[in-house]
Image (cartoon, rainbow, N blue to C red):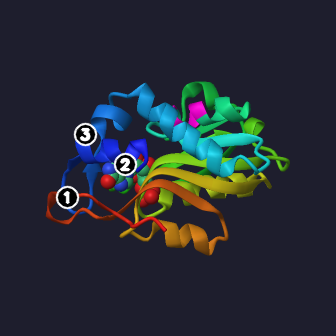
Amino acid sequence: MSYLKQKMLTDSVVVNENVVKVDSFLNHQLDPVVLKEISKEFVEYFKEKEITKIMTIEASGIAPAILVASEFDVPMLFAKKAEPSTMKNDDQYSTDVHSFTKNTTSRVLVSTKYLSPDDKVLIIDDFLANGEAALGLMDLVEQAGGETVGIGICVEKSFQPGRQKLEDKGVDVFSIARIASLANNEISFVEEE
Ligand code: 5GP
C-alpha cells in the first residue's frame, strides 16, 4: 500500500460521506515525507512523458506540484484565484472554477507569459472530486494552444464524477489514493488490480 494511503488511514479525518480532511499532512500542516513519497509516485508514472511544465491551482496543489516540477526539472505554474494588483497590466488566460469544498465559483487566471503553444503540461492537484479544478486548468492550457499530457491527483474520490469527466476529454489520469467510499466514517479504497 502506498505511503499516502497508509497516512490517509491513520491521520485523516472523515468529515462526512463526501469529504475527508487531511489538514495534518497535506492541506494545512505539510509533511515533507508524505510529499516526497507522493512526488516519487507521480514521477514514476509520468516519467516517459515529455513534460515542459507542471501546473496546479492555489493553494493546496502547490506543495506536491513544486516537488514534481523539481524532479522533472521544469517550471511549476499555479493558477491564481484572485487577481493581484501586480498582474493588472498582464495579459491573462482565465476561466471559472466551482469549488467543491467552498461551494463558490471563482475566476482563476494565469499570465499569458507563462503558457505557450509549445507547452506539454502535467496537472497536479491534491484532490479530485467533480473535476472542476482540473477541467479549469485544462481550459487554460487549451486557451494557450498547449497540451495537457496528464493529470496527477493525490487523493481521488472515485465515487464522484471527476475522473470520468477528465477521461472523457481523453487525458491520462493517475491518482495515488482512490477512495471508493467514505460511508460509516471509514475510508475504503478502490481495489488495486
Ligand atoms: P473538484 O474541482 O475536483 O470538484 O475538487 C477538487 C478541489 O476541491 C481540490 O483542489 C480540493 O482543494 C478540494 N476538495 C474536494 N474534495 C475534497 C475533500 O474531500 N477534502 C479536501 N480536503 N479537499 C477537497
User: Which quadrant holds residue 6?
Assistant: top left
Q: Which residues are magenta?
A: 63-67
Question: Residue at the left extreme?
Answer: 184
Label 3 packing within 10 angstroms: few (<14), some (14-19), many (20+): some
Instruction: Name the residue type under label 2.
Output: Lys
2 and 3 marks in contact (CB < 8 Å): no
Tag of residue 186: 1
Q: Main SS type for the magenta part?
A: helix
Disc 2 or 3, which lies upstream in sequence? 2
Q: Residue at x 57, y 38 (%)?
A: 40
Disc 1 or 3, which lies upstream in sequence? 3
Expressed as whole percent of the image width and height from the top left, the position of residue 102 reads 32, 50
Q: Residue under circle 3?
A: 11
Q: Give the spatial CA distance, label 1 vs label 3.
A: 12 Å
Label 1 packing within 10 angstroms: few (<14), some (14-19), many (20+): some
Q: Is residue 80 shown to the viewer in this render?
A: no
Instruction: Name the residue type under label 1.
Output: Glu
Instruction: Name the residue type under label 3.
Output: Asp
Q: Going by the image, does 143 lie left or right of 102?
A: right
Q: Give the spatial CA distance, label 2 vs label 3.
A: 10 Å
Q: Is residue 156 shown to the viewer in this render?
A: yes
Q: Residue under circle 2?
A: 5
| Residue 179 shown in magenta | no
Number of marks in the rendered image: 3
Q: Is residue 115 above or below residue 66?
A: below
